[in-house]
Image: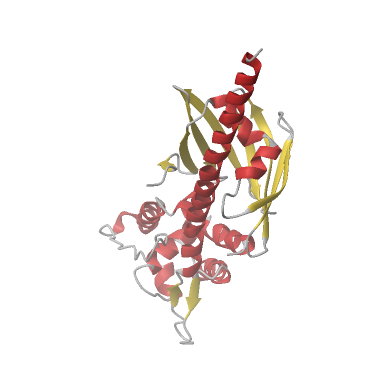
Amino acid sequence: MSKLKLIDGAPNEIIMEREFNAPRKLVMQAMNTPALIKRWLGGTRATVVTAEVDLRVGGSYRYVFQLPGGGEFSFTGVYREVGDDRIVHSERFNDDPRESIVTSTWTEHRGKTTLRVVVAFDSPEVRDMVAGNRHGRRCRRELRQARGARREPLTITARRRGNSSCC
Amino acid sequence: MTPARLDATFSALADPTRRAILARLAQGEASVMELAEPFAMSQPAISKHLKVLERAGLISRGRDAQRRPCRLEAEPLRDASGWIERYREFWEASFDALDGVLEDLKKTARKSKRTKETP
């Protein structure tokens, strides 16, 4: 079973939750210190070749990854809030002009720490597309509105194939 | 999927009319006239939206010169919704590795504590 939980949030959000068997300070240290980040970020999927962290409000970070096949990708952003148990930063994938806002909170209980990461996309549309969740409902509602009240409600069977989104 | 193509998909989907068009096409192919009918929009206006959708690869147009029926193309939508799955997998693999690093850090912390306690 996956230890990483995905939680349904606001229309433009993706929420992840994960518990670690370590105190909050240790988890935050491991997640925000370049030398330690290099040891775990990307796991078996990618290697961190560059980790720069300027952990203060207005400071920026940059993670550059190398894929086993040789390709590279990066996450960059600026810290907006840096607290004892909460960090808020922007996140940009490669050179995509769209930013998401990532809010991480660490809650300790009996020596274990629960990390909650809220990724807010710049529009509900992007999130819906990414998550493929409520898109179907929204499309159907909008189609009904577009058709107005002059007809009987339209029923659409979203043809889902695999994990494809609606429509 | 390249970020540029993902971007084209997202831009195409940012408009409610275009999403409604896709919802209609999920039922089966339709001509511009049939697509324009439920909207309070002219056919040229609908055609503009169709061009955006076509450029993003979300729809394709039939060859029939008269009707040129529009058809939904599922591939870009599937790619985009696959993105969240890859994002989740990326973090899952990362956090699994973080478990190991935390165990190391705890051991080191215990060791240094013991060293300090020893006179």
Quadrant containing the C terminus of chain A is bottom left
Which residue is located at x 57 percent, y 55 percent?
Answer: A45
In this rendered view, identify the residue nearer to me: A34 or A141: A34
Q: Is residue A124 left or right of residue B108?
A: left
Which residue is located at x 53 percent, y 42 percent?
Answer: B95
The answer to whether residue B99 is above or below residue A66 is above
Q: Does residue B87 appear in the picture of this structure?
A: yes
Q: Quadrant of residue A144?
A: bottom left
Q: Position of residue A109 (x, y in %)?
A: 45, 23
The outermost residue toward the front is B119
Q: Position of residue A149 (x, y in %)?
A: 31, 54
Which residue is located at x 42 percent, y 62 percent?
Answer: A164
Q: Is residue B6 left or right of residue A75?
A: left
Q: Position of residue A124 (x, y in %)?
A: 50, 46
Which residue is located at x 39 percent, y 72 percent?
Answer: B34
In this rendered view, identify the residue nearer to me: A65 or B81: A65
The answer to whether residue B28 is above or below residue A48 is below
Q: Does residue B38 appear in the picture of this structure?
A: no
Display coloring: secondary structure
Q: Position of residue B49 (x, y in %)?
A: 53, 66
In this rendered view, identify the residue nearer to me: A45 or B41: A45
Tell me how many marks there are: 0
In this rendered view, identify the residue nearer to me: B35 or A108: A108
The answer to whether residue B60 is above or below residue A149 is below
The outermost residue toward the left is A152
